[in-house]
Amino acid sequence: MNTDKNELKGNSQPTIAVIGAGIIGINCALELQSLGYQVTLVDKGDIGQGCSKGNAGHFATEQVFPLAESSLLWQMPKLLLDPLGPVSLSAKHFIKAIPWFMQFFNNMRASLRDKNTVAIKALNKNAISHYCALLEEANIEHLITLQGSLLVFETTDYNKVDAMYQHYKNEGVAVKLLDRAETLKLEPSLNDNINYSLFFTDVAHTIDPLTLSVALSEFAKSKGMTFQQGAVTEITQSDTGVTVLTDQGSLTVDHCVVACGAWSKELLKGLSYHLPIEAERGYSLSLPLPNNTNPILSRPVASAERRFIITPMHNTLRLAGTVEYAGLNAPANYKRAEMLKDNAAFILKRLPEQETEQKSEQEAWMGCRPSLPDSLPVICQAPNHDKIFFALGHQHLGLTQGAITGKLIGQLVTKKKTEIDVSPFCISRFN
C-alpha cells in the first residue's frame, strides 16, 4: 500500500482516503469520487461487512427522537438485569460504560433533547430522496422499497398509543394511527393480538443491505475509486497532506475522512480528540423463506412492546433488534438472536419455517452500532486538522443517513455551503 508522495503530486486529481467501508464510508467515497477526487477506500475487512451487513434494512426517517428519554430511567434497572431482555449491560463492561451512561442520562434533559431532535430531523428530512437519486443513477433502484413501515402494539393502552401518534405528528412525521382491522388489511400475516399500529407512510426498506453496500461501492469503483484492505493504526497530518498508517503499509493523500464507526475512538484519540462512543451491539436473525411463496410481509414491522423489528428481504425474513453493551471485542451471545424468533411468534401468525417441511439454515448475526450519548453522529471537519474530516457515530441510523452524510462530507471537503446546518454534529461538543 506504500504510495509515493511525489507521484500523488503529479496527479491532477486531489487525493483522499476514506477509512471505513461500511455504508457511511461507501457513500462518502462515492460522493467524493463523483466530485473529482481520487478516492481510496480503506478497511480492515471486506466491503460492508460490519453493521452494514446484518442490519434491519430499514430507512427509518421516522426515528427523529434521541434514544435518551427520561422514561427509560425507571425501566433501565429491569431492562439491564435481564440478560435476554431488549437491553443488556455486561457485568464485565459495567465500569467502563459508566461515563457514557452519565452523558446519556444528561441528554435526557428537555432542552438538550429538543435540540437533538431538531438536528436528527434535519438529517432525516431528505435522507431517502438522496438515496433514490443515487440508486437511480447507479441503476439499482430495485434495492429500495417505498412501502412505509408499521409500529404495532399488542397491550399498550389506546391513550398511550394516541399520545405517541400525536408526538410523531407534531414533529412533522408522516404517520397514520390504525386499528386492528386496518392494520391486518395492510399486513394479513400479522397476529390477531395486534390491537393498534402506527403506519409511517414515507419510510423505506431495502431487500438486502449488504447487496446495497456492495452495489454502491461498485458504482464508486466504476468512477475510479480504489479499495485497499488494511487495518488503520494511525493518522497524521502535515503541511503537505495526511498519512494513513496501516498494517499493510502507509498511504499519503491530500485529505482523509474517518468513517469507521465504533472503531473510530482510538484513531481519534491519536489525533487528540475525545470521542465518547459505545459499541451498542445489535443482533439479527434471518429466516429463509419457502421457495415460490408470497412474501409474508410487505414492509418492516416493529413491535413497540418487544422492541424489535421484522423486515421482508430477498428470500428471507430478517428479525433485528436488542441492545447489548459489552464492548467491541466480547464474544457474541447468539441467544439474543434466537430470542428474536420467540418474539416474532407473537407478532406473526406463522413463522417462515412453519410454511415448509424443508428446514433451511437460519443465519444469526451480531454487529456493533456506533452510539454517542446524544444520538447525534459526528459529521464535521476536524477542528484542529483542516485536512481531516469525520463521518461516524450514526447509532441506529447509519443506513438511513448514509447518502445525506456522503453529500454533507462532499460539501465540507469542497468548502461549499452545506445543505443543512452541521454545527450540531461537530466533535467539538465533546472536546
Image: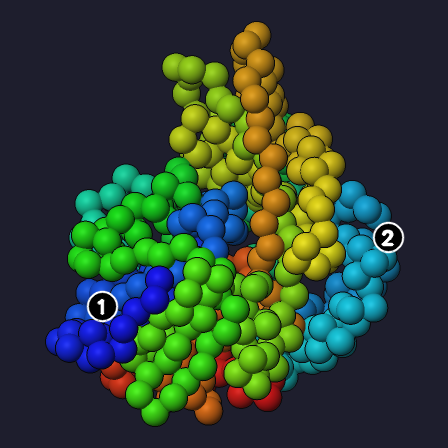
Per the rendering, the mark at residue 289 is none
Comparing 252 with 134, the one in front is 252
Residue 144: image quadrant is top left
Circle 1: residue type: Gln
Is mark 1 in CB contact (under 8 Å) with mark 2? no
Give the x, y percent position of residue 338. Answer: 69, 33
Residue shown at 51% from the left, 51% from the top: 50
Q: Determine the image quadrant of residue 92.
A: bottom right
> How many labels sit on residues?
2
Say which residue appears at 39% left-offset and 61% top-offset: 42
Q: In the rendered image of this protein, does residue 405 appear above or below residue 81?
A: below
Q: Nearer the viewer, residue 203 or 321?
A: 321
Q: Is 110 displayed left or right of 127 in the figure?
A: right
Task: Give the camera-side residue of 3 and 132.
Answer: 3
Q: Is residue 333 above or below residue 396?
A: above
Q: How far is the residue under mark 1 from the one under mark 2?
A: 50 Å
Q: Secondary structure at mark 2?
A: helix
The circle on residue 81 is 2
Kind of residue at badge 2:
Leu
The residue nearer to you, when weighing 130 against 367, is 367
Percent across and percent down for residue 337 are 67, 38
Residue at 40%, 69% in the rendered image: 250
Q: Residue at x 58, y 26 (%)?
A: 362
Give the labeled residue for mark 1: 38
Indicate left or right for 415 with 113 as reference.
Answer: left
Q: Position of residue 368 (x, y in %)?
A: 60, 55
